[in-house]
Image (tube, coloured by chain):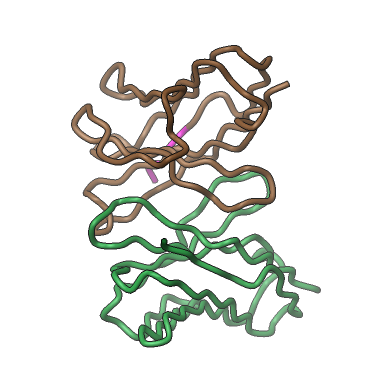
Chain colours: A brown, B green
Amino acid sequence: EPEVTQTPSHQVTQMGQEVILRCVPISNHLYFYWYRQILGQKVEFLVSFYNNEISEKSEIFDDQFSVERPDGSNFTLKIRSTKLEDSAMYFCASSELRAPTDTQYFGPGTRLTVL
Amino acid sequence: GEDVEQSLFLSVREGDSSVINCTYTDSSSTYLYWYKQEPGAGLQLLTYIFSNMDMKQDQRLTVLLNKKDKHLSLRIADTQTGDSAIYFCAEVGGATNKLIFGTGTLLAVQP
């Protein structure tokens, strides 16, 4: 069964450093998403992406964050200058059609630890 | 704004039924979902229900939706130790494509 994959599974970085989290969505999916889950808190929406554009973003997704689909398979989330409070599990998701018409399938997550 | 709430913890014995409850505030919710998260793993879609339905059954899983009370429940029949996980309900409205998640319910199944 096709699945969303994410790399790395765990990333440790120093405060102020840039990180890039990578995702390979399901191949025929057109809509891509990033969510995050700070330890002990709810899963929160960050951004959705379609047709090489951001279609929706939350208040969390400020100028420090960016997303990109650099080629036909990868979808990346970049944090330019990481803060301690960026430590969280970051989940990528994809859907074939626009939600809510279609369900979002999640990757296993990347645990980001900012020291 | 939209909010989704769940009880934090449920403990059941193996073989019993589990019922996990969820309430939401967004009356424009069109789809409601249940996701399962096992330790160290991602979010696995279990089932979903469209807002014009009252009930959906999928093998051991039964989803009940009370749209008037904005209450969603997930019943797991014959609960097994492998069902131990965190269960999240989530909703999405018509004008957006973002999922709003609940706090998650930790289901502990005792042998």
Total residue callouts: 0
Task: Please give left or right for residue B107 compared with residue B21 in the image.
Answer: right
Q: Residue at x 29, y 51 (%)?
A: B97
Residue B41 appears at what percent x and percent y?
61, 45
Extreme-right residue of the structure: B111
Please name whichever residue, B33 or B109, is drawn nearer the observer in this view of the structure: B33
User: Residue A28: x, y in percent?
Assistant: 24, 38
Q: Residue at x 35, y 39 (%)?
A: A57
* Farthest top residue in view: A17
Q: Residue at horizontal 64%, vertical 27%? A: A10
Above or below A54: residue B37? below
> Which stretch did the figure color magenta?
A1-5
Q: Is residue B4 left or right of residue B12?
A: left
**Residue B55's quadrant in the figure?**
bottom left
**A55 over B50 or under it: above or below:** above
Residue B76 x/y as whole percent:
57, 78
Viewer-proximal residue among B27 and A31: B27
Q: Quadrant of residue B84?
A: bottom right
Write down the quadrant of residue A77 in the picture. Answer: top left
Q: In screen coordinates, is A28 left or right of B82?
A: left
Q: Residue at x 42, y 67 (%)?
A: B47
- Direction from residue B74 to residue A95 in the image, left or right: left
Residue A19 located within the stretch drawn in magenta:
no
Magenta residues: mostly which secondary structure? loop
The residue closer to the viewer here, A112 or A9, is A112
**Quarter the C terminus of chain A occupies:** top right
Residue B45, relative to residue B5: is it above or below?
above
